[in-house]
Amino acid sequence: MTVKTPEPPALPAEVDRLLRRLRMPYVRRAAPEVIATATAQRWEPGEVLRVLLAEEAKGRDEATIRMRRRQSGLPAGKTFDAWDPEASPIPKPTQQALRTLEWLERAEALCVCGPSGTGKSHLVEALGHLAIDRGKTVAWHTLESLAVMLRRHRADDSVSKAIARLIRADLIVIDDIGMLPVAPDAAQALFRVVDAAYEKRSIALTSNIHPAGFDELMPKTLATATVDRLLHHAHVLITDGTDSYRLAQATAATGVRPLT
């Protein structure tokens, strides 16, 4: 016969009211069980307080991470849990060095260049998720979304303020440069973001072409000024020499679940 454990008693109404007023939801949620356990095991009052405050701190940290993940705009949920370091052409020591995130502390840039499907976006998105897990803020963009931001704020002459808000993020990710022709607004937006972040914040950029070839995509003068700032403190990784992961999955019929 299974003995059902009794539910912990509810908090006294006055305690519940005070916890609501003080905005301590995680203490409110944990307190009944913690108090019941403390009573049964004869905990010292200081230990009860420590456990309850630890629950509140943990809950707030997790809520902050969830909020930062939503605000970042990270698109696909690709993390290092699904990353195969053996399949990447990037040397393992380099992968490990990137995952320390020490380059973020130095406000250095990361440029990952190579053909489509070679893991560029997965790598920088996974780095973005890792940065959030470690208390950093991240903003994910494409050239198109930067151009939209520029046009939206140009109407009321608030572009500088919008870019200043953007570079408050510890890491700004700009994905898939070179996939499409670069419109004038997008080229200007890229320069303004790179210029504003220079030696202040880290940028992680993915591209089908090396930044040295950006003058094929945008006006030469603007490209030169952008690349000069971008590459001054940058780690440039090349993912040539590997087949497309997406094409390999499609060929092996592992890109979808079998139809039944």
Image (cartoon, rainbow, N blue to C red):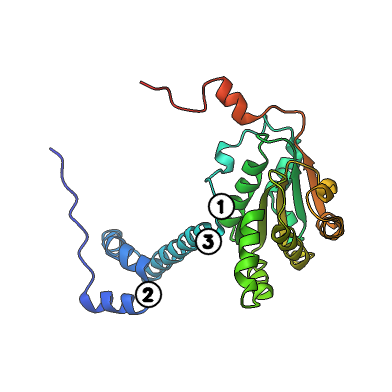
Q: Secondary structure at mark 1?
A: loop
Q: Is residue 142 visible?
A: no
Distance between mark 2 and mark 1 Cα atoms? 29 Å
Distance between mark 3 and mark 1 Cα atoms? 8 Å
Closer mark to the observer between disc 3 and disc 2: 3
- Where 160 falls versus 128 (above or below)? below
Label placed on residue 74: 1
- Where 146 falls versus 124 (above or below)? below
Q: Who comes first in sequence, dot 2 or dot 1?
A: 2
Report the quarter where the C terminus lies.
top left
Looking at the rendered structure, the kind of residue marked 3 is: Gln
Find residue 128 and report its horizontal and vertical position in percent: 61, 52
Q: Which residue is mark 2?
A: 23
Quarter of the image holding residue 189? bottom right
Distance between mark 3 and mark 2 Cα atoms? 22 Å
Report the quarter where the N terminus lies.
top left
Q: Which residue is mark 3?
A: 71
Looking at the rendered structure, the kind of residue marked 1 is: Leu
Closer mark to the observer between disc 2 and disc 1: 1
> Is disc 1 surrounded by few (<14), some (14 to 19) or many (20+) residues within 10 Å?
many
Q: Is residue 62 visible?
A: yes
- Where 114 falls versus 176 (above or below)? above
Find residue 185 and report its horizontal and vertical position in percent: 70, 61
Q: Who comes first in sequence, dot 3 or dot 2?
A: 2
